[in-house]
Amino acid sequence: MVTSTAALLLGAVLLVAQLQLVPSRPATPGAEPGQLELARRGATLQGEGQEGAAPNGSAQQLPQTIIIGVRKGGTRALLEMLSLHPDVAAAENEVHFFDWEEHYSQGLGWYLGQMPFSSPHQLTVEKTPAYFTSPKVPERVHSMNPGIRLLLILRDPSERVLSDYTQVFYNHVQKHKPYPSIEEFLVRDGRLNVGYKALNRSLYHVHLQNWLRFFPLRRIHIVDGDRLIRDPFPEIQKVERFLKLSPQINASNFYFNKTKGFYCLRDGGRDRCLHESKGRAHPQVDPRLLNKLHEYFHEPNKKFFELVGRTFDWH
């Protein structure tokens, strides 16, 4: 009789222990430990009153994927194309949580509040291109979730420099403010001005090495931004596979707009193109200066190719 009672008590204890191990939120099939921990942290923040669930059962979740850069590499196009997938919930604006101290000091609760409402099965994505070149960001992202998947979209470094300048130039034009020519930024005392910030942003191997201190290369998927412009569907297929999403985006979701000169999106019968600020013509640059730019990036590009174990069709 004593043995039988003891067995019943032991069974009850084991049952209670198992119930305590059940996660507070439904686990995504195939989810990795880092993703489960992220879900628990998000649920904890919501439980503390940071943000509540919506009536339809959706809730804000910390991102499981971040587009970290690069500036003028095609991050907006990548986010818009990825948003075609029904299992992706994307933050509309650049959040600048990890690189702006006034945001980071407010903690993960503030960050969670910037995320879109999503269903438990959806992947939350945010993009802030400045993350890639900000020294403090890799460690901060790793601290939030070491298992996060990172997307990095890159273009020919020389072309990216010209796009960088073009964006700032047009920002000044819209405000009716003067802005120096690109030659004034690129040349100092007859030589290439290596202190120009736009040049530094295109030294991809330098910035990626900082990320690789905290994340293995398998956690970072590099999207070929030049190919994404020319033929977006194959590049998006690779992103789907990296994020372990079911193949939902099709070639029919893209069509070439001859007027704009680049691909636009077709989603459920609704057509949309990127903002008119995208795809602006670059300034005319003296061919000799352009050659100097290509020569400057030759060795850094080789180092980058060696770092990632692949090549890109850059000058």
Image: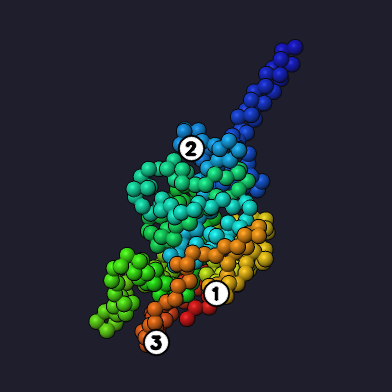
Query: How would you rate the neighbour count of disc 2 (Cα within 10 Å): few for under 14, some for 14-19, many for 20 or more?
Result: some
Pick the front one: 129 or 230: 230
Circle on res. 184: none
Pick the front one: 251 or 150: 251
First along the sequence among labels 1 and 2: 2
Q: Which of pointers 1 and 2 indicates the residue nearer the eye?
A: 1
Count of number-bearing discs? 3
Q: Is mark 3 on a helix, strand or loop?
A: helix
Q: What element carries label 2?
A: loop
Report the amino acid beneath label 3.
Answer: Pro
Report the amino acid beneath label 1.
Answer: Thr
Q: Image quarter for residue 181?
A: bottom left
Q: Identify the image quadrant of the N terminus.
A: top right
Pick the front one: 148 or 163: 163
Using residue 88 as the reference point, say whether residue 92 is left or right of it.
Answer: left
Report the amino acid beneath label 2.
Answer: Glu
Q: Where is residue 200 in the image (x, y as percent from the top left)?
A: 36, 69
Q: Mark 2 points at which residue?
A: 51
Q: Which residue is drawn at 47% across and 33% down?
A: 49
Q: Position of residue 140 (x, y in %)?
A: 42, 51
Q: Which residue is drawn at 32% across and 80% down?
A: 183
Residue that protrudes farthest toward the bottom in the picture: 288
Q: Mark 1 points at which residue?
A: 259
Q: Residue at x 48, y 37 (%)?
A: 51
Residue that protrudes farthest toward the left in the picture: 189
